[in-house]
Amino acid sequence: MKYAFFLGCLIPAREPNYEHSVRKIASELGIELVEMEGANCCAPFSIQSVDYASWLALAARNLCIAEEMGLDILTLCNDCYESLLMTNTILKEDKETRDKVNEVLADVGLEFKGKTNVKIFSDALYEDIGLEKVKNAIKEPFNGLRVAVQPGCHLTKPKRIHFEEIVAAAALDELVEATGAESIAYERKEACCGGPLRGINDEVALHVAKQKLDGVKTAGADCIVTVCPFCYNELDMGQLEIKRHFKQEYDLPVLHFAELLRMAMGMKLEDWEVKAHRIPITKILNIKETK
Amino acid sequence: MITILNTEKVNLLVAHEITNGDSDLSALDAYFMHEVANMPRGRGVLACIQCGRCTSSCLVARVVEEHNPRKLMETIILGLRSDVLRGQLPWHCLSCFTCLDRCPQGGDVGEAMFAIRNLAVREGNIPNGIVVQAQSLFETGRVVTPSRMALVNRKKYGLGKEPTVDVEAVKKILRKTSFDKLIYRGS
Amino acid sequence: MKEEPRIGVFVCHCGVNIGGVVNVPEVAEYAKKLPYVAYAEHDLYTCSEAGLAAIKKAIEEYKLNRVVVASCTPRTHEPLFRATCKEAGVNPYLYEMANIRDQCSWVHMHEPEKATIKAKDLVRMAVAKAALLEPQTEPEVEVKDASLVIGAGVAGMTAALSMANQGFKVYLIERDKEPGGIVQRLHKLYPTLADSSEVVDPLVEAVRSHKNIELMTSTTLKEVSGYIGNFHVTLTSLSGDKEINVGTIIVAIGALNYRPPTGLYQYGVYDRVLTQEELDGILKKGSLEEPDRIVMIQCVGARKGEIRPSELEAFPKSDTAELLRKILKARKEEGWPYCSRICCMNAIKNAILVKEKSPRTDVVILFGDLRVYKEYEDFYRRARDLEVRFIRHIEEVPPEITQTSDGKLEVMAYDALSGLEVKFPADWVVLSTPLRPRRGEVILARMLKIPISTDGFLMEAHLKLRPVDTNVDGVFLAGTVSGPKDVSESIITGEAAAARASILMGNRKVSTEAVTAVVDKDLCIGCGLCEEICPYGGPKIEERKSKIREILCRGCGSCAAECPRRAITMRHFGDHQVLAQVTALLMPESPKGG
Amino acid sequence: MVIGGGIAGIQASSDLANRGFKVYLVEKSPSIGGRMAQLDKTFPTMDCSMCILAPKMIECARHPNVQLLTYSEVRGVNGSVGNFKVKVVRKPRYVDETKCTGCGICSDNCPAEAPNEFDENLGIRKAIYMPFPQAVPRLVTVDKDNCIECGLCENVCPANAVNREQQPEEIVLDVGAIVVATGFDMFDPSVIPQYGYKRFKNVITAMELERTLCASGPTGGHLIRPSDGKIPRSIAFIQCVGSRDRRKWIDHPYCSSICCKYAVKDAVLIKEHEPDSRVTIFYIDMRAFGRGFQEFVNRAKSEFGILFIRSNPGEISENPNTNNLIVWFEDLITRTVHNATFDLVVLCPTLIPRKGVEELAKILGVELDNYGFFKSVDAVKKPLDTTVPGIFACGYCLGPKTGDVPDSVAQGSATAGRIAEVLAGMEVS
């Protein structure tokens, strides 16, 4: 498989460990990741809040780049995924809007043709690579690990609402279980992490994150696993802030799904990657060691 | 936890709560619903049957009393334009789409929130956090820019070359859509 | 030669309905010891096929000639058990029922022992009466294969056509000059937005041209006598009276729109305050320009007030016209208590029509509960997509309407959800008013002896299971005369009433009440009190003696109770039979119960 | 021919039979009675449902012009109005209908148990069973899926009625007109995960409550909650579960038009059972239209103290220790979000087209409407005529056009009238 690799803004800036794991897995599973030269920000919901036309045009520019490469887009981030997927759908379906956007894009010498598809990492593994192939690649399964999967809103809901599919969350659950871990049920699994309000209203964001963490803790999870860098950031760093703010400690390690899969495939995390987690993940590593 | 009041009390509550509140009723704008409904993504406001499921489901509404998506829709139908566009009301939403997922009318409350925000921004109502991201986007093509340290580390960890962005193209697009006018108005 | 009574007693558990409280086996054992009881048993459900089979088997085996069932109410189950007796060769009137469910297990749910004692009492009484029962026959009458349909609205015309198409002669009378009823005056119909003429015109044409239908307009009912199968009806019109004989009657006189009293919401004060019906007229004429705003107010005169029992109790005894005037007057001030079912859709329909014609007009609908039931939900959505504004207001505080100096109206209401006082300048204010009973209904009710329900509409025989039948055999209800309905619902009840009437007419014969009054000619002094008191016109004084026309007698017993000479007795409820029950109750040890 | 033996089908059959037509009443399940048989009381008169239905069932079944074909299904239809040929398959009961007396000895001895569909699977029944005590016809049926083939029933049956080798029987009937009265199914609320149906024991559906309240139901009429068998002290009803719902994966945009009414009725019943309990109804619009109903709602408020809260709750969570339920809702009157704890939550699910209705429509050649109910050829003028002449429909299979029992009865009578009209017209021409 070959994809136009859309990194977005947050991952290169803050979470190189995520990107690293994805690249390791990709080469192991024979996925080719082609850089998207000159791609801009996906235009997440904060930009959507400012202006509709600007959002569509910016996102469409990225889609056009992938179209010119003749490849489908692979994203690692829920927000990028939502923004690009929605834009792709709107522009494919609505000719009037497409014409307007193309008028803007003409200035930078591009035209949206509707020839690319948008995939997020977990969906790509599930749909294109196949669960079987992923399972076969597992060398050191996480047997007995109780995982609270945080699918993230922008992975599941837009997809469910606009495309009548409810597979996205289920796909992630199945992938997590492929690593030998158990994806447990917990209250407010579908709920938001609070991340979107970061920078707008931090206190509310923390309250929301807290509701989520309460559910996870009650269900007795060993750790949280997510594909979204925003959820990761909010739930990982958020725990420290909640500790300061509410004097409440959860001590729930948060892992990128790519990290979980990578370890299960037998590729150890490097020291700098372990240290990138604000909530120590040594607990998880120890579980692994003792096996 | 609340204790359920008996019917009489609840009814009395209504009777006593007839007030004008702080709202400026002279500014009642009958065409506000029309205005929102005809914004891109704004159609959802017409779907609303005022059932309250969105607010009951909303995580923010449980924390922030004034955030109430159902009431926001109602306020729009009533035509309290300035209440909606001038205040904090549009900016508590997480865009988590829970309401969108649950609204029985398939009414895009969460979507309509973008239409309302777009209108609010045109009125100059835009939170700082978003201005920072938007200006960063205009200037660098990214909402979050990697620090020098991050780029150094990138090399160290063997993550390949630094991702590029065509800032000029981004600026061209955003000027064409007048995005810059919206985000640099305040400064 | 009267044979010795041999009574079989069947006590029902009704699952746990009775058996959960009353000790049913004990009651059955007790019954065995009562006089003339030849057999007693208890069943889980006596009314089930097995229970009925058991009755038949026991009748045969023990040569029973009287049957007592102790179970539920005769209202629902007597016909079934009587039919069973008949099938086993026992006259159906040699059957008696004790209601040990309603009167024992239900009301004494928490006192099982006392309930059991009471059940025994009731069974003992029933047995005492059963011993004295006599066989009766149900007179059979012929049913004329012609029908009278009163009211040529949509429901009436539908009913008339259905019967006429089945080959029955139908007299269709209408008090107005033209058939078509209330629907004809409407503009468009929801939810199809078809012209009302699309529904009415084909019906009018069909009833006019059908060879089996005699349509008489400007005609009213003058007098009705007779009974099921043989109603003798006098019709009156400008051209004089006409007498007809019919087997069945369908009442389809419809309902009227409530018109608010002058001053309510400034109706009748400002000429731009209308009812939906009047807006309909304006829309039909096409004379509505492009107003800035129309405000509609729902539930004006509906779901308000209550009809006092005294208003209804007074009805049979007082002068009809005077009473009716009183009820309508009170209701005009207070409004009607029921939900009129159609006003929400009606308002939405008119809102859509306005919006489609003039999109810039702001249409506001002030409502409390929006009752767009069924698939009309789609219709509601359509209105919202057209940007009609639905605003829930506090119904307890009626909106106030004032006129501003520029001649515009202003509606002030309280928004129910925000609690805000909101003001709407408006070009038109439209009041959604309910359907109300017609004045003529009460006169008809008196003439035909159909009871009026507490909401003022005519009452059906059973709210759940006999929605188009009435208490009077051979008389049926169609359309809005039995409560508000929309057009399709009226059509359905029209078809249904026609179907029920056709069964009677198709079978040509019907058996009637066997429990009738009997006059002892020797005792009768011909005072005429019975004739006066009877609500059904049964007794008639002929040759200074009372004569009961059995076919009219409904067995109510009023005459028997009033007769100063005790000359009248009721079949099946003779003094000796009733007294035997009383004696059995008061003197449990009395050997033969009377 | 009438397809479906619920109240609408029974009324249509009785009226047709009394009008002099030969009627084949085809019912899929072992007994006629339909949904109304499952109800406890009917609104707003509070008549015991079975008590008023049972005589009608028996009257219909005993009519000399009615031939009951229970446990049978329509498999094919040919011809046109006045002259249909209908292929009906009589499913094997594994019991000889002519011999069985319905004594129930077989059921008493049968060792195999299965969930009782009639009690909404709350109780159990045997593999050889009668669906409910007042069943018509009074015959037992062997449910082969749950039968363990022990042969005990065969041995104990005094009438020698059990025949385990019975085969499906196919018959072809000539009929002039067809009435479809196949009724409805209940929406499965577990499709809406946030209400926790099937996840939380004390979240039940209205139909389950109906069976619980019924004196002949699985609990003997005692209102108890599933988790611990205790009497619930606070009960919440949630309206519009799946109805008025346009979401693509639910797609029942219509109002079922009966839920408000039955919820108020059930609330009053609960108050009659347990006067101390607190009953709350969460609703969007109180659709108390129809005869006597507004008055009934007023009584429910003033006389029985039932609390009506205008709100559609967003989610329900469970207290794992007590199994009590926490309902999150916005009180639209105080405009604030609350949570309240209840012992029992009753969901009022929408009514949806019966399973298999598409297949039946295909067999009959009639069209279905947008919602999947049978389509009227003209919603206003000819509401009971399907798109094929000579095939009529009545009752809830027409969709929410039917408000309730009286509407179904009126429609049953009306289809009988339509058929008499149409067939009479044919004789003339």
Image (cartoon, rainbow, N blue to C red):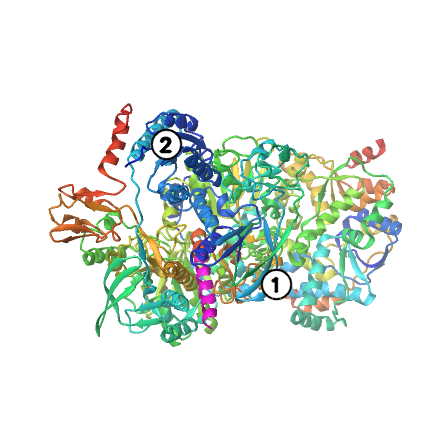
| Residue A260 rendering spot, x and y as whole percentages | 80, 42
| Residue C215 rendering spot, x and y as whole percentages | 32, 72
Q: Nearer the viewer, residue A70 or B62?
A: A70
Q: Is residue A9 magenta?
A: no
Q: Are marks 2 and 1 in contact (CB under 8 Å)?
A: no
**SS at badge 1:** loop
**SS at badge 2:** helix
**Chain hosting mark 2:** C
Give the alpha-carbon distance from disc 2 to disc 1, as whole Å: 83 Å
Residue A57's quadrant in the figure?
bottom right
Instruction: Decide whether the magenta segment is chiefly helix, strand or loop.
Output: helix
Q: Residue at x 38, y 27 (%)?
A: C32
At label 2, which amino acid type do we have? Cys
Q: Looking at this rendering, what residue extends furthest in the top direction? A: C589
Location of residue C70 with respect to C179 vertically, above or below: above
Q: Is residue A101 visible?
A: yes
At label 1, which amino acid type do we have? Arg
Q: Mark 1 — residue?
A: B185
Q: Is residue D417 magenta?
A: yes
Q: Mark 2 — residue?
A: C104
